[in-house]
Amino acid sequence: MKKLFLYGLFTLSVLQANGQQGAAPKFGLTYLDDSQPMEERIEDALSRMTLEEKIAMIHAQSNFTTPGVPRLGIPEIMMTDGPHGVNKELEWNSWNSAGWTNDAATAFPAMTCLAATWNPEISLRYGQAIGEEARYRKKDVLLGPALNIYRTPANGRNFEYMGEDPYLVSKMVPAYVKGVQQNGVAACIKHYALNNQETWRGHIDVEVSDRALYEIYLPGFKAGILEGNAWAIMGSYNKYRGQWCTHNKRLNNEILKGEWQFNGVVISDWGSTHNTDEAALNGLDIEMGTWTDGLTTSEKFAFNRYYMADPYLRKIQDGTLPLSTLDDKVRRILRLNLRTNMDRNKPYGSFTTPEHYDVAREVAEEGIVLLKNDKNFFPIPVGRYHKIVVIGENATRRLSTGGGSSNVKVSKEITPLEGLIEKYGADKIFYTMGYGSGPTSYGFATESPYNADSLKREALALAKDADVVLYIGGLNKNFNQDCESGDRLSYGLPFGQDELIEDLLKVNKNMGIIIISGNGVAMPWLNKVPALMQSWYLGSETGTATANVISGKANPSGRLPFSIPKRWEDNGAMSFGTMSYPGDSIRQVYMEDILVGYRWHDTRKIPALFPFGYGLSYTTFAYGKASADRAAYGENDVIMVSVPLSNKGTVSGAEVVQIYASQHKPSLPRPVKELKGFQKVFLEPGESRIVEIDIPVKDLAYFDDAAHAWVVEKDKFTLHCAASSTDIKSSVSIQIK
């Protein structure tokens, strides 16, 4: 009975007997026949649906589900928060835990860590693993990955994003999306678009040039759609050009569904829908979370009053709104059904497997960035020291929870301290907090229950005679740190950590610092410490990965996915004052325009504390001179840049070879250079390789907003082979004909 479900026969007889609106009697149930073309199945199902059934499909029936059409055997759509792990089960219509005992998932590293790997291959494995967990839990849509650009280091949600560079994001996203969707689970890329801060996110009206929109803020979404073939996308809370992004005519109809020909589903962020007419006409397909604040509060069981529920139904019935736009929404949802829960060939998935923990650990190890390492402070081999003192709350804090909707109920989470004890032995590791932050909070300020002076005194006493001190601090996922719904309030480390570090250095200078955060922080003590690592929210295998990198079992190969400025004012967006960030509470203007991140630092000659693309290794790499395969190219050609690379050290390691492009005489202002290619290369000690990186000439284009077109000019370009945005090894000039 491949072609028919038994209840389909019953359904057909009911339709024939009742003669329901939109349900013409038919004897072949094409929509249930998976041997038929998808679009024919969609049209067949659509023709059998009543107007009321169509309306029901386009809005929520619970916090995380939308109804199908039970009469026709079309299942409901089950969604789950991501993108770092499948969220716990919640009650049907509240934000409370459902109390399940079998919903504790694998926590994968946050998106900043994935971006810091600069490795699309591991991004694919990440997507496959989290997709398997979502499929096992019978989820149809994973609400991730998050792609918004790191515009300022103040954004509380930067830890969910992939950094400041649109090219890096565009190369990491498609692999993640494909990995998830191999499991019959839709990746829902978010938050479309211009959701670059949490302060006033629910109403701020963003003003940005077309050029910055197309060159900086849209490429990640475009790559997710055109290269990753994402099946869903989520609208953002904010406004653009005076219209809510979730039902924004320009973003949805003209760009997404027009220029990019997106055939998937646009889902609102929870509570981001505001108007029936705009939602109906401007490309929103599924309305979720209306009458909630997207966080903790909600109006109970208001689903029929959603903007795209009864109000939409009445407007179609009285002729105010056309049926055609509703049918377009339902077609897209049916397409989502056929790709996910109605695909009888989808895999079963798997959950919290050793393989998933391996992926989490490997991403974590590849993402940790070694920023400073005087006199080879790191690695610290097992057996070198008798007394290793570990100081810092983040050494024991479980950081998979908190931070907002991306928090994960974990099956296990190994803390850094647990990993270090396992690696070096309980008799070698001595721990004290040093500082305390208080409980995790989501949207509400909390106070530390600890006595700061007592914690500091204990830390100083323990560090005084230590062979080596490892300080593990940074930010956490409390409100006004790395947390949804609020931005950071200052650039320094919170809870008195900067002062604590200064005092610790007075009693023991042999101290390495590990910052755990999703954002850059001020480092007034940097010149006084011998070694520094940038770590991230690493998930279930935090401790194992951290100990492996510190001990040298794993060689750090992460590279910064964003610039770390010396001061907040050195950041382009923040340098222009409050109208640029965070705005006046109603409106804001992206005054730095296309000069985001390293583009700003380079062009305005304001050095970053640590530049984009930067990271050290336990081995040494030697670059030869870069060359191009020829001197001149047409606009449809592909440039191949070659560079010899050798591992001159004694341990295996990975280098990220980066290619930046500069145009000599552009008609419009351009940044000094822009990332246009990269490759992560793994080499054994003494091994050499010719690294070849392809750069399509079309990628050298800028967006001419006057002509509304991408333009590659006839001009001379210089391609820089580099180890970071500031560490250029050699350059080669080419001519575009």
Image: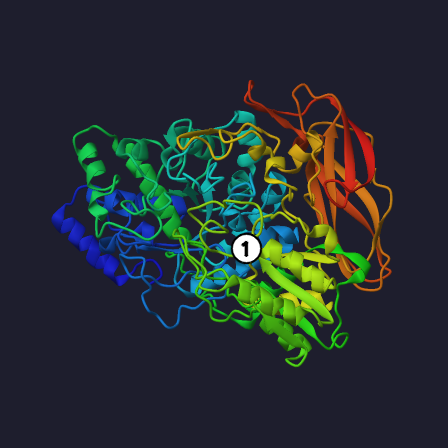
Q: Is residue 455 above or below residue 587?
A: below
In this rendering, the answer to whether 419 lies above or below 556 is below
The residue under the point 62% across, 31% down is: 595
Where, by quadrant of the figure, is residue 81 drawn?
bottom left
Instruction: Quadrant for residue 567, please give it.
Output: top right
Residue 703: x, y in percent? 59, 26
* Left or right: residue 240 compared with residue 723: left
Report which residue position mark 1 lands on. Answer: 475
Q: Vertically, is 135 above or below 203?
A: below
| Residue 352 point in image, percent of width and height | 49, 70
Q: Is residue 213 placed above or below 167 in the rendered structure?
A: above
The extreme left residue here reads: 18
Q: Closest to the observer: 196 or 417?
A: 417
Residue 116 visible, this orientation: yes
Rendered-image quadrant of the N terminus = bottom left
Depth order, front residue of 696/452: 452
Q: Position of residue 28 (x, y in %)?
A: 28, 51
Count of all numbered marks drawn on residues in the image: 1
In the drawing, does residue 331 fall left or right of residue 352? left
**Which quadrant of the rendered structure holds the C terminus?**
top right
Q: How is the image coloured?
A: rainbow
Q: Residue furthest bottom?
A: 427
Q: Position of residue 104 (x, y in %)?
A: 43, 68
Q: Residues within 10 Å of mark 1 (few under 14, many from 20)?
A: many
Instruction: Give the residue displayed 37% in from the left and 51% down from the top.
Output: 337
645 sits left or right of 306 in the view? right
Q: Of helix, strand and loop, which one carries label 1?
A: loop
* Residue 40 seen anywhere in this rendered image of the structure: no
Name which residue type carries label 1.
Leu
